[in-house]
Amino acid sequence: MRVVISQSMYFPWVGMLEQIRLADVFIHYDDVQFSKGSFSNRVQVKTPSGMTWMTVPLSDHRLGQTIEEVQLQPLPRWRDRHLDMLSSSLDGTAFAGEALDLARGVIDGNHETVAALSRTSMLALSRYFGLDADTRFASASDFGIAGAGSERVLALVKAVGGTDYITGHGARNYLDHELFEAAGVSVSYMDYKCAHYRQLHGTFTPFVTALDLVANCGQDGLGVIGSQTRDWKDFIHGSS
């Protein structure tokens, strides 16, 4: 049973969709402190004039709030601005209409918090590519598991019967790999291939919203979502 635990991301990059594709269970880790500069409320967009950030503005954000608690600004201006930015970015792609319809369905939704908006954006992308068929989604707050750090992550993995914890590269700096190993849970790191696909506006980059993949490739973009994993020892020690 493969488990991914991650903070929700706003229309995330392809690498997050690759984690979802590999997961039997995906747990939204949104009952942790919101951090400015995270990807919970922002994502990069490639435009004719270069890379830019598409950022959702917050309302009365206070230090210490969890992602689930942080409120969005209710004004429609940011929604219109994001749709205009995407329209400019994706203009000329084969499936721009599908990508913009997907984005509009999320952005125009009645979301009050960062967590709700970002989860919906991830699920919309997952459904578009059919990734939700074999992945069960849950929220960390549903399990009533206290604590922090590696101990809590391990407890969440075990709560859903997980035997393999799949994570992104940032975890190498804090995860207690031996703790997981002692509990009989393997740890695997994403081995991102950053596969190229046809893309507008200059040199290819994988580090943009996956709406770009939708717009350029349509549902055939599923073939790009193909990265696998490496065992933590292989990843940490850099062996090939």
Image (cartoon, rainbow, N blue to C red):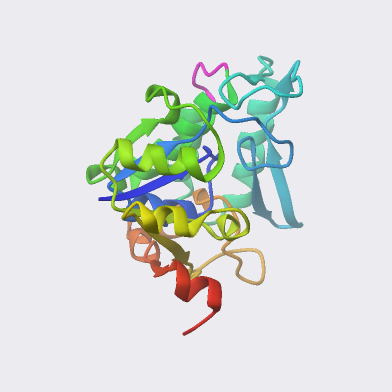
**Viewer-side residue, 124 vs 232:** 232
**Where residue 167 sits in the image (x, y, percent)?**
47, 55
Q: Which residue is drawn at 29% across and 47% down?
A: 162
Question: Looking at the image, how many numbered discs can be counted on the residues?
Answer: 0
**Where residue 79 sits in the image (x, y, percent)?**
63, 27
**Viewer-side residue, 4 vs 220:** 4
110 is within the stretch colored magenta: yes
Residue farthest to the bottom, as pictured? 240
- On the rendered structure, is 159 left or right of 237? left
**81 w.r.t. 129: above or below:** above
- On the rendered structure, is 75 left or right of 9? right
**Where residue 239 sits in the image (x, y, percent)?**
49, 83
**166 w.r.t. 12: above or below:** below
**Where residue 52 sits in the image (x, y, percent)?**
73, 50
Q: Can residue 166 be seen in this view?
A: yes
The span picked out in magenta is: 107-112
Residue farthest to the front, as pictured? 182
Magenta region, main secondary structure? loop
Q: Is residue 94 visible?
A: no
Q: Which residue is drawn at 49% across and 35% down?
A: 29
**Viewer-side residue, 219 vs 53:** 53
49 is within the stretch colored magenta: no
- On the rendered structure, is 91 left or right of 50? left
Q: Which residue is drawn at 28% across and 38% down?
A: 160
Q: Which residue is drawn at 55% across and 35% down?
A: 148
